[in-house]
Amino acid sequence: MPIYAYRCDACGHTMDALQKMSDAPLTVCPQCGKPALHKQVTAAGFQLKGSGWYATDFKGGGAAATASAAASSDSAAPAPACGASCACG
């Protein structure tokens, strides 16, 4: 169940409420008792931590990444005109 943040317009009291998404929003402030409680817009409160597919996949270093790196280096730039390791290319 998500946690919603609320703020009372009358007294400024703030609170968090654990509610179902289908529950009606709270309207009465538990601090002052007035019907001035409104839901606030907040950022999502989750973070991806630990070892998992997002940390290990798509990072490179695997067989697929090595194969694609080798393919891109083959077609990168033509060899220098003189065939030596100078800066003419």
Image: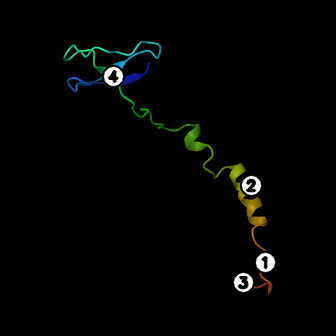
Q: Which class describes the residues within 10 Å of circle 2: few (<14), some (14-19), or many (20+)?
A: few
From the viewer's side, name the closer residue of 65 and 13: 13
Query: Gap in Å between the C-alphas at discs 2 and 1?
Result: 21 Å
| Amino acid type indicated by mark 2 | Ala
Q: Is residue 41 left or right of residue 34?
A: right
| Amino acid type indicated by mark 3 | Ser
Q: Residue 67's mark?
A: 2
Query: Gap in Å between the C-alphas at discs 2 and 3?
Result: 26 Å
| Amino acid type indicated by mark 1 | Ala
Name the secondary structure under disc 1: loop
In the rendered view, would you say 52 is above or below 22?
A: below
Look at mark 4 in the image and give the residue it sits on.
38
* Mark in the foreground, 4 or 2: 4
Q: Earlier in the sequence, mark 1 or mark 4?
A: 4
Q: Earlier in the sequence, mark 2 or mark 1?
A: 2
Q: Is residue 64 left or right of residue 29?
A: right
Look at mark 1 in the image and give the residue it sits on.
79
Look at mark 3 in the image and give the residue it sits on.
85
Query: Gap in Å between the C-alphas at discs 3 and 4?
Result: 70 Å
Name the secondary structure under disc 2: helix
Q: Position of residue 38 (x, y in %)?
A: 33, 22
